[in-house]
Amino acid sequence: WGVVDDVVMGGVSESRIEMKTSKAADGSEVVVGQFQGFVSEANRGGFASVRTAPFDDPLDVSDHTQFRLQVKGDGQRYKLIVRCNKKWDSVGFCYSFDTVKDQWIDVLIPFEKLRPVFRAKTLPDSDPNAKFEPSEIFALQMMLSKFEYDGALNPNFTPGPFTLEIASLSAVGISPRAVVQHRRRNKTSSSARDSVQPEFPRIIHIGSAGCTRVLRPSEFPDESKLPPAVKMNAMLGRIMEWKLSGEDSVRESALDHVIIRPCALTEEPLKGYSALRVGQGDTMTGKLSREDLATLAVDCVFSDSLVNKTIEVSEIPEDGQQSQTAVKSLDELVKSISETDSNLSKTRTFAEYPYIPK
C-alpha cells in the first residue's frame, strides 16, 4: 500500500496506513490496517487515500457476488475503489460507505453497485470500460474525499484529522457461475447429500404464509378468511411485516437460501410428501404438521430444487381434489416451482424491496 493524497494536484493533505492492534466489538484484540491522516481543503485539495501497487497477477473473485468490509470509522463517508486494469490512470470502480463513529460495522458491497468512474466522472453503461470484471482485479484503494462523483460533494465529510480501521476486506456470496461449476464437479456423486460442500453455505429460513397479505388489502378484502396473525398484525407489533423484512434480509445476504412459508402449524403426526402441496405468491391457507415442516426443511439442505426460491406449503385440504400418491420426495413435490427471488426488486409492486416497516 502506498499514499496517494491531493498533493498530486497541489493540495496539502497527508495520510498513511499502518498495521495496528485494536479492540474488536467483543473486546478481543484484532490486527487492523489503520488508515489515518489529515485532510485539508487548502489549494483546492480535499482528499487522502492509500492504494496498492498493481498486482503482478490479478485477483479473481468471479466465484463471488460482493465485497465485505469490516471497518471502524469516525462517522465520515469513505470510498472503496477497485481497478480492473494495470494502468495507473484507469477506471476506478467505486463504492461510498458511511461509518459510525467508534463502532465496528460490516459493509456489504454488491459488485453491481460499484460505480465506474474515470477522472471524477461516472462512465455511462454504454462505455465498454464501464463493466466490472471480477476476475481481473489489479489494484485496491481506500479514500476519504470531500468530493463524491460528477461534481457532487460528500455529505459526511469534515476537513481535519481522520481515522479508519480496516479489519478485513473479503469477497463473499456465491455467484451463479460458481454454483454451476460446483454442481458439474459433483454430478456423479452417489447421492445428493454427498455433493453438498461446506464452502457453499445454505440458509433454510422458516417464515410464515400470509406475511405479505397485510400489504395487499385489495387482493384480500375478506378479513375473516385471513390467517389470525395477519388479522392481528398491528396488535402483535406488526409481526407479519417484520417477517417479510426478515425474509428480505436473507435474500440480500447473497447466500444460497430457501425460504419456506408454512401455513398454520399443528402437532399432528407426519403425513409425508404425498399429503402436501406447495405454491408461490402467498395466497395459500391451510395447516401443516411441524414434523412435515421439519422434514421438508432438512431435505432442502440436500436439494438444488429450491435454491434462492420462496414457497408456501400446507397439507392438501381434506375436501381437495388434488391427488399425488406417487409423490415421495421433495424434488417431486416442488418440480413446478420456478420463480426465483432474483427479480423481486423489479417485480414487487405492493412494497419496496428490501422491505423495512416504517
Image: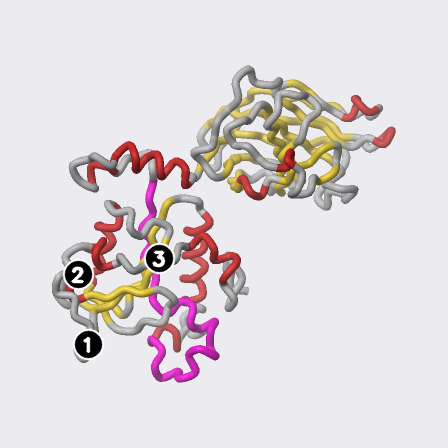
- The reply to whether residue 63 is in sight is yes
Q: Position of residue 248 (x, y in %)?
A: 45, 55
- Crowding near the residue tagged with mark 3, few <14, some 14–19, many ≥20 C-alpha atoms within 10 Å: few
On whether residue 232 falls in the magenta region, the answer is: no
Q: Which tag, 3 or 2, sits closer to the chain's start?
A: 2
- Crowding near the residue tagged with mark 2, few <14, some 14–19, many ≥20 C-alpha atoms within 10 Å: many
Looking at the rendered structure, which numbered label has been put on residue 63? none
Tally of marks: 3
- The residue that appears at 21% across and 56% down in the rendered structure is 332
Amino acid type for the residue under numbered disc 2? Tyr
Amino acid type for the residue under numbered disc 3? Ser
Marks 1 and 3 sit apart, C-alpha to C-alpha, by 23 Å
- The residue at which mark 3 appears reads as 338
Q: Position of residue 86 (x, y in %)?
A: 62, 21
Q: Which tag, 1 or 3, sits closer to the chain's start?
A: 1
- Crowding near the residue tagged with mark 1, few <14, some 14–19, many ≥20 C-alpha atoms within 10 Å: few
Q: Position of residue 340 (x, y in %)?
A: 40, 55
| Quadrant in which residue 315 is drawn | bottom left
| Quadrant in which residue 222 is drawn | bottom left
Q: Which residues are magenta?
A: 201-227
Looking at the rendered structure, which numbered label has been put on residue 273? 2
Looking at the rendered structure, which numbered label has been put on residue 321? 1
Horizontal placement of 147 versus 57: left or right?
right
- The residue that appears at 34% across and 67% down in the rendered structure is 209
In this view, the residue in front, 257 or 319, is 319
Q: Secondary structure at mark 2?
A: helix
